[in-house]
Image (cartoon, rainbow, N blue to C red):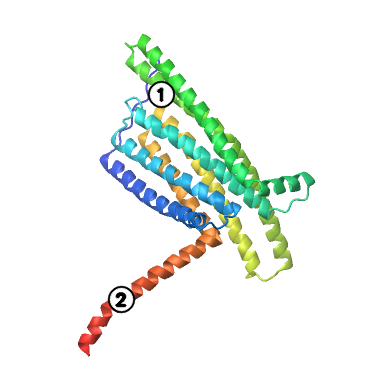
Amino acid sequence: MLTLTPVITVSYEVKSAFLLLSVLEFAVGILANAFIFLVNFRDVVRRQPLSNCDLILLSLSFTRLFLHGLLFLDAIQLTHFQRMKDPLSASYQTIIMLWMITNQAGLWLATCLSLLYCVKIVRFSHTFLLRLASWISRNISWMLLSTVLFTSVCTSVCLWDFFSRSHRTVTTMLFMNNNTELNLQMEKLNFFHSFLFCSLGSIPPFLCFQVSSGMLIVSLWQHMRTMRAKIRDSCDPSLEAHIKALKSLVSFLCLYVVSFCAALLSVPLLMLWHNKIGVMVCVGIMAACPTGHAAILISGNAKLRRAVDTILLRVQSSLKVRADHKAGPRTSDVC
């Protein structure tokens, strides 16, 4: 007979701390990704041409906005409504399914961005790789459209699998209505199988991202070694730029891997091991990684850095004007 794992209770203080952390991550993530989206969308409104990189950033930031909203709803549902000993509610299952679809779309867009960086930076010597790089640089728009189509197909397949398994679970539970514990276990296991099935769609972009990122890291490292051999001055600006790019790329790769692993671990923690604290940690990591990714994108993009500098200058000038207005009446009174 199947037995449920003992439920680990969570104190009110832990729930409050997790909810506060979720609010902070939601606010920072929304601000960072909304900034990326608005900077690039402004060019669309002005009918200015967008580069391939800006087009990917526009799509990726829009996806991340929706992703942060789903993760925040997940945190609220987890702390206030979903209990480990109860079956997964329909609303919580819907949030998980929507998150999976959105995250998969984000993975494909991040892979397109990594491929674009790879095409721009890596110097290929093989004829096939040269042609492939040229094709990728010319067909970024079609790659984005293919991402949308592939995500739509995966969404349809996942929804079909999810509802078909739910129907079979309900049918089975009607014949086994006397065994509540076994029914609960079967329902969670069926949803876990649906989650694993839908996660298969994330494997192709994940592998492509690993390959392109690995090629970028190797190419940058070889270029750094060449520059170190030719230039003895450690303060060479070109060398510093390559070191900064390498650090940014490694950070981006680490965030991608950590977020992917936390996503895969969160569902068995929730439905098989009933560890709510572990699920909270995974959800916090999943929300922090897109925020960190947005910060890396802003720091590594010249257009976004200029927009940040412009905003900071305007804020500084407005604060200075307010300070002058406040100091003006006092000076006239003294005179």
Q: Please tell me how crowded label 1 is: few (under 14), some (14-19), or many (20+) other residues with Cα within 10 Å.
A: some
Q: Position of residue 80 (x, y in %)?
A: 28, 36
Q: Circle 2 is placed at which residue position?
A: 323
Quarter of the figure that contains the N terminus: top left
Judged left or right of residue 211, residue 310 is: left
Marks 1/2 in contact by CB < 8 Å: the verdict is no
- Residue 238, by quadrant, is bottom right
Q: Position of residue 176 (x, y in %)?
A: 36, 10
Quarter of the figure that contains the C terminus: bottom left
Q: Residue at x 42, y 17 (%)?
A: 167
The label nearer to you, 1 versus 2, is 2
Q: Which mark is residue 6?
A: none
In primary-sequence order, the first of circles 1 and 2 is 1
Judged left or right of residue 271, residue 331 is: left
Amino acid of disc 2 = Ala
Amino acid of disc 1 = Lys
Q: Position of residue 61 (x, y in %)?
A: 48, 49
The foreground one among 52 and 262 is: 52
Q: Residue at x 46, y 63 (%)?
A: 308
CA–CA distance in space, label 1 to label 2 = 60 Å
Q: Is residue 177 visible?
A: yes
Judged left or right of residue 104, residue 23 is: left
Q: Is residue 206 visible?
A: no
Q: Residue at x 34, y 72 (%)?
A: 319
The foreground one among 322 and 258 is: 322
Q: Secondary structure at mark 2?
A: helix
Q: Secondary structure at mark 1?
A: helix
Is residue 175 shown above or below 108? above
Q: Please tell me how crowded label 2 is: few (under 14), some (14-19), or many (20+) other residues with Cα within 10 Å.
A: few
Q: Residue at x 53, y 45 (%)?
A: 256
Q: Which mark is residue 188?
A: 1
Query: For the view shown, which residue lies furthest in the bottom direction?
Result: 335
